[in-house]
Image (cartoon, helix red, strand yellow):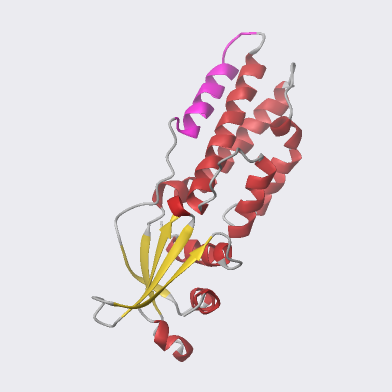
Amino acid sequence: MDAKNILDFLKDEGTIRCAWGYELVKTSLETNPKNYLEYAEEDLNTNLTHKYINALSNIKRALDGQADRLMKLLGVQQKRTIGFPKKLEYLQKVEILAPRILNKINRHRNLVEHDYNNPKQEDVEDFFDIVSLFISSTEWYVENTIRLVEYNNEENEDFQMYNNIEVTVDNENSQLLIRRLKPNLKSCIDELIVNINDSNYFEILKFHLKKVEFR
């Protein structure tokens, strides 16, 4: 069993979830990013002369916070804070961010990367809508991704030896633990650890996330 075989197995349309655990992947932060959006909305509804500065600051915090939750999901350890463009690169690797949202964020890149003393009302309100969309479109992943999922494939004979594959997202250690179980599901035949430095890590995680996205 190797990472390339597992990737091909997960890509196959005949590979389905057959069991899963109850523990979710932990991605929580001290302050939920949606709270910052609420603060931004309150800022926009005030009569203060600096309300757009305040709102923009909270919108940025919401965007960064949600990106950080997604980094935790992917197992990207931020020993030193990485820039938002780099975070977007990681998100693109697993394709959980729709291109249209990515394009909207990129069009407002200056608001993300620079400080403004007098941001325009239209820019701030547009940015608020974009970040709201970013959070709502990725919220399922950070709130509901299950830590352990088991797969099988009874349609493709090429994968008979890979039936009863168990995938565990160990994001705290930046790795995927993959176990091949015996038919009775009580013992392991062999196991594979794919860490974040493996060339197949993000591809395996991408197809795993696609398979487990049931709402």
Q: Which residue lies furthest to the front in this view?
A: 79
Q: Where is residue 169 in the image (x, y as percent from the top left)?
A: 42, 59
Q: Residue at x 52, y 27 (%)?
A: 36
Q: Is residue 172 inside the magenta stretch? A: no
Q: How many marks?
A: 0
Q: Say if 8 sits above or below 90 in the image.
A: below
Magenta highlight: main SS? helix
Q: Say if 49 sits above or below 150 in the image.
A: above
Q: Residue furthest top?
A: 48
Q: Residue at x 48, y 89 (%)?
A: 158
Q: Is residue 47 inside the magenta stretch? A: yes
Quadrant location of the C terminus?
Answer: bottom left
Q: Which residue is drawn at 59% across and 19% down?
A: 44
Q: Position of residue 159 (x, y in %)?
A: 45, 85
Q: Which of 74 and 141 is in front in this view?
A: 74
Q: Say if 157 sits above or below 41 in the image.
A: below
Q: Is residue 5 left or right of residue 57?
A: left
Can residue 48 be seen?
yes
Q: Position of residue 126 (x, y in %)?
A: 67, 32
Q: In this view, does 111 lie to the left or right of 10?
A: right
Q: Give the range drawn in magenta.
A: 31-48
Q: Where is residue 56 in the image (x, y as percent from the top left)?
A: 64, 24
Q: Quadrant of residue 131?
A: top right
Can residue 101 be seen?
no
